[in-house]
Amino acid sequence: MHFIDIHTHINQQNADAIRIYNLIPGENLPESFFSVGIHPWHANKYTIDQVEEIIKAHPDKCIAIGECGFDLLRSPLSQFEQEELLHAHFKLAQKYKKPVILHLVRASHIIGRIIKEYPDLTYIWHGFTGKIDIIHQLKDNDMYYSFGLSAKNEYVWEHIDEERIFCETDDRNDAISTVYEKLAEIRNTDADLLKKQIYLNFKNIFGDGLARQD
């Protein structure tokens, strides 16, 4: 049974982990599975057509859309423009039947309204640092939350439903096993039990076919 690194910017293989690499349009394809989308920080550099071309060319390796979303601190686009771009990502996710990896900064008050228009999609909020109230507000959506070593508010990660969690390395060089160990410590559980649960969560989204080393 492998570790699952649900979101990484580090393009390297790990025999013990299934890693979803965050591909930026124009980059060389990784050997691993990948997600592709337009990060809010770089939303004026790429087009949604470029994203779709990559999905169409590599439908088996591209297993998720994103990261995409809102960043009301650092994006060069206005809130309205970011919202339009996010709708475009969600429509691609519907078209190709793929989950969405979200980047959300100062946008929890916005995302709940938008995803109501896409109740058929599955979402993974990467690097979640919000409060438990946000999770309660989104409980009727198919939303998962990903933990990284920069996560804040241990109370949230202590109490969130185990069937809704993932772990990630994001842009850090830490081993994914270290991330699991930290989350297991916060949740006061055994790291092996956590590993089994996250593996099941991965299977629930991606199916048995991907729950293996790629």
Image (cartoon, rainbow, N blue to C red):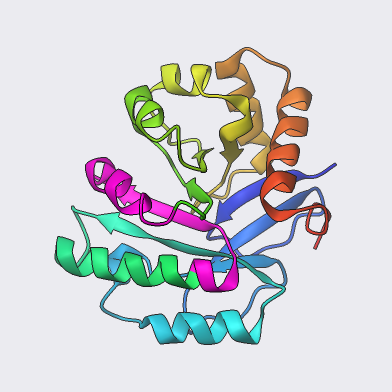
For the N terminus, give its image quadrant: top right
Visible residue check, residue 36: no
What residue span does the magenta drawing correspond to? Answer: 93-118
132 and 105: which is toward the camera? 132
User: Can you say whether 186 is above or below 36 in the image?
Assistant: above
How far across and how far down the image is residue 32, in percent? 71, 66
For the C terminus, give its image quadrant: bottom right
Q: Is residue 108 left or right of residue 154?
A: left
How far across and how far down the image is residue 49, in percent? 42, 86
- Residue for point 53% across, 73% down: 95
Visible residue check, residue 72: yes
User: Can residue 110 be found in the magenta stretch?
Assistant: yes
- Residue for point 42% across, 53% down: 102
How far across and how far down the image is residue 66, in percent? 47, 63
- Residue for point 67% across, 63% down: 12
Report which quarter residue 213 is drawn in: bottom right
How far across and how far down the image is residue 41, in percent? 29, 65
Q: Which residue lies furthest to the top in this view?
A: 188
139 and 34: which is toward the camera? 139
Report which quarter residue 184 is drawn in: top right
